[in-house]
Amino acid sequence: MARDLFEAARDAMARCHAPYSKFPVGAAIRDSDGKIHAGANIEVISFPEGWCAETTAISHMVMAGGSRIREVAVIAEKLELCPPCGGCRQRLAEFADADTLIHLCDADGIRKTLRMDELLPYAFETGAIG
Ligand code: THU
């Protein structure tokens, strides 16, 4: 069950740049064409300038020409399960659908799966722009 996505997230975690928090995170996205895009957290000495693993994965998807997120895997080796932070929930929602699956993983594989609308209920939307 989405083993390839889990493995991509786990392998991406090893590429984190997290010298300040020492908290490696990996994320992997399967887009609507079935392609996988992975990312890790990247920290900066001016701490607020760093960003999350999910954000790296989203940017890889967009630059590879992907448009919609079908499912996501997230892993952090120092946390049993690593639910995406609030900012990343909003970023994921930008490219996800209500039934997009977010898999929370540990070292052995997927441990918990949530839908996007469970992870970010009552999300900000506007019909007024665009
Ligand atoms: N982090 C992520 O990569 N994703 C999340 O959803 C939560 C937090 C990273 C940011 C920072 O590099 C480290 O975890 C500690 O907060």
Image (spheres, helix red, strand yellow):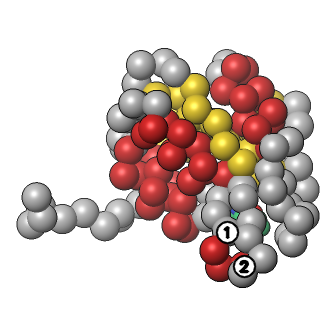
Quadrant location of the N terminus in the rendered image: top right
Q: Measuring 78% from the left and 76% from the top, which residue is drawn there? A: 45
The amino acid sitting under disc 1 is Gly
Residue 67 in the figure: left or right of residue 2:
left
Residue, x 45% and y 38% (percent of image)?
63
Residue 99 in sight from this viewpoint: no
Q: Contact, CB < 8 Å: mark 2 with mark 1?
A: yes
Q: Position of residue 37 (x, y in %)?
A: 58, 32
* Image location (x, y in percent) of residue 8: 72, 29
Tell me if I can see residue 56 in this picture.
yes
Task: Give the residue pinned by disc 1.
Answer: 50
> Counting other residues with Cα less than 10 Å from the Cα at mark 2, is it few (<14), some (14-19), or many (20 or more)?
few
Horizontal side of residue 44 vs 56, given as left or right: right
Which mark is drawn over residue 47? 2
Residue at screen point 36% across, 52% down: 94
Q: Quadrant of ligand 1?
A: bottom right
Cα–Cα span, label 2 and label 1: 6 Å
Q: Hey, what amino acid is under mark 2?
A: Phe
Q: Looking at mark 2, is its residue's CB closer than 8 Å to ligand 1?
A: no
Mark 1 close to ligand 1, CB under 8 Å: yes
At horizontal 73% and vertical 71% (from top left) the residue drawn is: 44
Label 2, secondary structure: give it: helix
